[in-house]
Amino acid sequence: MIITAMGRWNPAPGRLLEWHPTAAAEAIAAAAPADSAPPSFLQEDHLKAAWAARERGDVHTAYTGVATEIDGDVDTDAMSRALAAYVVRHEGLRCWFEVENNTVVRHLATPEVAAFEVSDAGESTDDEQFQRYVRQRFSSEATADVWPGFVVGVVARPGSFTLYYGADHAFTDGGSQALVISELADLYALETGAQVPELAEVGSHLTYAADERARAATFGSDAPEIAAWRDIFTRHDGRMPRFPLDLGLAPGEKAPVRIVERHLLDKDLTAAFDAACKAAGARMSSGIFAAVGITDFELAGATDYFGITVLSTRHYGDYGQSQGWFVNFAPVAFEVAGHDTFSDVAALAHRGFEEAKQIAEAPVHAVLGALAADGTLGSELAVSPNMLSYIDFRWFPGVGRDADTRAKHFTGEGSTSNASMWINRDGEHLYLVAQTPDTEVAAAAVQRYHDHLAHVLNTIAREGDYDITLDHLVQEPAGAGHLDH
């Protein structure tokens, strides 16, 4: 699987087949009663924002999707049964939501809602036509206010077909999207009589959401995890992390998203970089943060690295292969200035990343509530942070099998004021995907940043270390915690 831009997903032309609930299933969903299970914190934020966006008349782009190629003619009846089995396995996918007086209300349908039928939407003729079609489908159907909050379709042709799935972000995270296409392919294969590995049991996202609320209530304002957040933000003037270079935007301004992709290291160099991290007493995840911190220092004079990262929360229950939003956020901070080599910084980054894992025991909303109450963050609560994520896709359950190997994962593209990065490792290479503002200034800044990051990573991989200098510093720093010059 590779994360890519939606516009770079262009399957070969074919017949466009769609799966929709039967009339009986739609009636069951519409009559589904309100359920007492709360939304997770991230669901709640997302749903309230989605309702506000709909009131403004914005195009819905808060969805994420995945697609793969499957050999053989599509068996539409088998796919209908596979989709029904998939929905029965994941309780959270039987839900839809509404927002009443700024309160999120969940509706949960019975398992009998999982009944689907196929329809023919015509022919896919070229890339441009297909992109218009599929974006319109995702924008109008992958929404959380009418069941189902996901779309499933096939581009069918003799001897093969493209299977795709997309969902409103309320029902999925990046890990879920990486899991779903293999699971759907397995369920389909079972329905056609093929042999596949036994499917694991999956926990319910509704249970997770209730447990998350209970966990959050156990963290008082003086809890060590919240104190660590407070200390990090106090040291950074109470500001959310920003991209270190000028993106050509005024404070608070956003621009349409432009997805940037960059190959960083091939398979052998990735292994060599991993070895250099271990030699420095760090894991590869920490080494990635160290390399980014060095890049921030060398290009913008950032004396220490400060960022927000995404961490999985699937370990809180039997959620390893569940569908839903199973993540938390935590700050990562460590010094860069005053250190001469990558090896020096990697050890500090490792400590900072391990601290982030401990800090992430507190649900982020418990933290933000405490930091709002004591004035640590203030208006910064409304600021979206620049983020850095690292995922090693080699450990996902479907790795090595066709559905996963041939899969592409993509997101909707709204607007941003950051240039957040998702750095990923698979069996073939290390690469990054970034959501950047679509401005000329941003394009130049992001390219210069990614070029330098690639240089740092390549040097470490080839030479085992990297000497830190300020020879590349050519502009005024963009934020707090920078050198004066």
Image: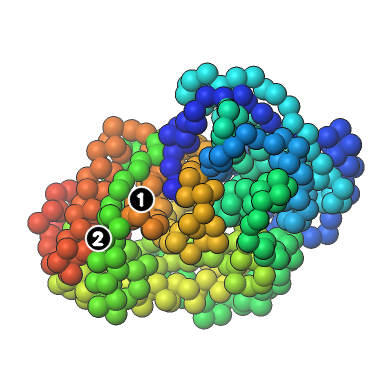
197 with respect to 148 (left or right): left
Report the mark closest to the observer, 1 or 2: 2
Residue 44, placed above or below residue 375: above
* Residue 432, numbered label: 1
Pointers 1 and 2 in contact (C-beta within 8 Å): no
- Residue 123: percent from left, percent from top: 60, 19
Q: Which residue is mark 2?
A: 269
Q: Residue at the location (14% across, 66% down)?
A: 463
Residue 321 on image: x %, y % = 63, 62
Q: Is residue 151 above or below residue 275?
A: above
- In the image, what residue type sits under mark 2? Leu
Q: CA distance from mark 1 to mark 2?
A: 15 Å
On the image, the x and y values in percent for residue 447 come to 25, 42
- Whether residue 101 sits left or right of residue 196 in the image: it is right
Q: Residue at x 40, y 57 (%)?
A: 426
Res 315 quadrant in image:
bottom right
Q: Please tell me whether mark 2 sits on a helix, a strand or a loop.
A: helix
* Identity of the residue drawn at 22% across and 45% down: 448
Q: Earlier in the sequence, mark 1 or mark 2?
A: 2
Answer above or below: position of 136 versus 455: above
Q: Is residue 5 left or right of residue 72?
A: left
Residue at (67% x, 61% y) in the render: 199
Among the 4 quarters of the image, the one containing residue 59: top right
Q: Quadrant of the C terminus?
A: bottom left
Disc 1, SS: strand
Tell me which colouring the rendered structure shows: rainbow
Q: Looking at numbered disc 1 in the image, what kind of residue is underneath it?
A: Leu
**x, y percent for residue 55:** 67, 33
Tag shown at residue 371: none
